[in-house]
Amino acid sequence: MRVALLTEGGYPYVRGEGRLWCDRLVRGLGQHEFDVYALSRDQRQEAFGRLDVPPHVTRVRTAPLWHADDAALSHAGPRGGRGRRARRRFAECFGELADVVCRGGATGPGGVTGLGGATGPGGSSRSGAAALPRSPGTGPQDRSDDVADRFANALYGLAELARDQGGLAGALRSETAVRILESACRAPGAQRAAHGARVADLLVAAGRMERALRPLSLDWYDDDGLGAADLCHATSGGPAAVTGLLAGHFAGVPLLVTEYGVHLRAHHLAAGDRELSAPARALLASFHGRLAAEVYHRAALITPGNTHARRWQERCGADRAKLRTVHPGMDSDRFARIGERGYGDVAPDTLLWVGRVEPAKDLISLLHAFAEVREKRPRARLRIVGAPAEGRAAEEYLAQCRALAARLFADEAPGAHAGGDNPVSVGDSPVSVGGNPVSFEEIGGPEVPGLAEAYAAGAVVVLSSVVEGFPVSLVEAMFCGRATVSTDVGAVVEVIGGTGLVVPPSNPRALAEACVALLRDPERCARLGAAARARALELFTVEQNIAAFRGIYLEIVSHCPVRREALDEAGEPVPFAHPAEAYVPGRWAAAGQASATESTGAPSWAAQEPEEREQLKGAGV
């Protein structure tokens, strides 16, 4: 089959999110053809270049979610769209979308107010022929169904206008758009936060909405582009998934959405930045919530990477029947030697932290916890391995952590940056002795040439985060057969599964007690490490990830109607190119899709229950 892989800020670029698992997925499914449609996030990402793609990637098309001069877009209108009819159509569609966004999220049982999710867990967000089946226990939600339909009609109306006019990027940032958004904020029924929006707030909100809707202006949806795909696989729920929505709208291509980090959750975590005022946050939260609900509604299947992401998706309108948890696939081979060796020559009393240094990792609590550990284990060492995340705030946080380490252990270090300056080797890896017991190191340096060497030196691996999605460093530690102490955030408990100790976040005393308990009992560490390695090899390898998606691809295509005849090189039909299930109406149709009688014009008896069909067959009909 031909799979259109839709990415945002990752594959096939050298730098970005999700590039490794996408590359492994494409290479592992060499029996399919892949077309890659990539959205880049900034100019620097494009400057770093792309990965080498395998031969069965037949096409790579890219488009920016940024512009060299985004402000210039606000002065442009739809290309070719200067007629009154086009302007009137834009005002109608964007006005409808703005009105829905400004009214906020009307929720059903268990829904999330203000997030745009119109349902409780597992509920539907639509009514009518194309509605998804509701999970047991969810009641009618007429008001929210109507609002969701209005959002969808406005979205696809803008998409059709963009196709006719050659793009809408300028129109969505224009003065007209800002005035429409302002009118919606002042209209009766708008959420209270929107009433206070100033022009500056509206400009910020309109600009960020335009970026999310930039796929509307792309020329990817014809029969030679996404219309030729058998399946669209969006690797995130943001603009990449919008591309899949439009492929489904214009060409009927089914959509699979994979989220290892829920896009809506990431938006809310980032919404506290200083650039956004309260009115802008409220507008964008409502917009992204409505967009996420539409993506979940239209997707044929949704594959969260863990239960934590799955809960978010359910709260935001995803139907439980569509959700299939597929754990990320990680390369275990580079940790095999360390994992097989076990605790043979591990540096004693060494705690290890690995990751990107940023406030969400809460290294401050870890350092205070380690101060308590030192009271009971005077020879304990803490190795912090990782570089700061991009941005000035992360660099300042690293400096703050270094200063705190120097202050907490002032009697053992001559200066604020002395930690880790004098390592000696224990086993295969160095540890800091004779100076500050806390060392700050980076992968690739002489002390830590690689990740495997870092994990080899740690008796206990610690994760101290207050916010976490899928904890990659924990899985790496599990591959290495190391005992772990983690905070109960994100998908930590699901990943650990009883093979490590879990404590509440932001609780240095609990973190210290758990670390001391393991440092005092090396045999327990070895047992937990062996169990952790066995669990990781069963659940989190590349092989299990590829096998899961191989089956999911076939399942989705088998449930979709045949849109064209498959021909070989000689122009002859390909035998068995389409599975038999695709021709059978009723129960073989994808859950939540319109019945075969409505979509294909099949006779009425095709939609009857099996018992009724048997009766008709017995009567000779």
Image: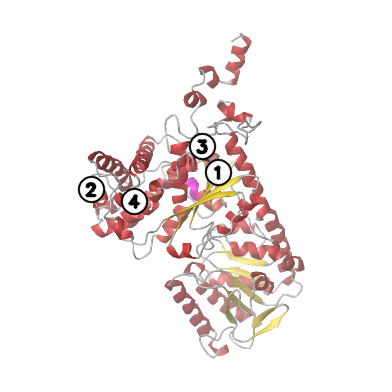
Residue wearing tag 3? 135
Q: Which residues are magenta?
A: 312-316
Q: Inspect the image, locate mark 2, and give the three-letter code of the amino acid beneath it.
A: Ser
**SS assignment at label 1:** loop
Upstream in sequence: badge 3 or badge 4? 3
Label 2: how many residues lie within 10 Å, few (<14), some (14-19) or many (20+)?
A: some
Name the amino acid, label 4.
Answer: Ala
Q: In this view of the protein, which residue sits in the foreground, 184 or 44? A: 44
- Mark 3 crowd level (few <14, some 14–19, many ≥20, 10 Å Cα): some
Which residue appears at 38% of the width and 34% of the height?
A: 142
- The reply, left or right, for residue 65 in relation to residue 20 is left
Q: Which mark is residue 183?
A: 2
Per the image, label 4 sits on a secondary structure element best described as helix
Q: Earlier in the sequence, mark 1 or mark 4?
A: 4
How far, Cα to Cα, is label 2 from label 3?
Answer: 37 Å
Q: Name the residue: 50% across, 27% down.
A: 595
Residue 114 visible in the shown view: no
Sequence order check, earlier mark of 3 and 1: 3
Circles 2 and 4: CB distance less than 8 Å? no
User: Whole-Å distance between the Cαs marked 2 and 4?
Assistant: 21 Å
161 relative to 123 in the view: left or right: left
Label 1, label 4: how many angstroms apart (C-alpha)?
A: 33 Å
* Residue identifier under label 1: 323
Look at the image and name its color scheme: secondary structure
Tell me the chief SS of the magenta region.
helix
Question: Mark 2 and mark 1: span between their CA atoms?
Answer: 38 Å
Question: Based on the displayed image, in which of its 4 quarters is residue 620 positioned?
Answer: top right
Q: Identify residue for label 4.
A: 169
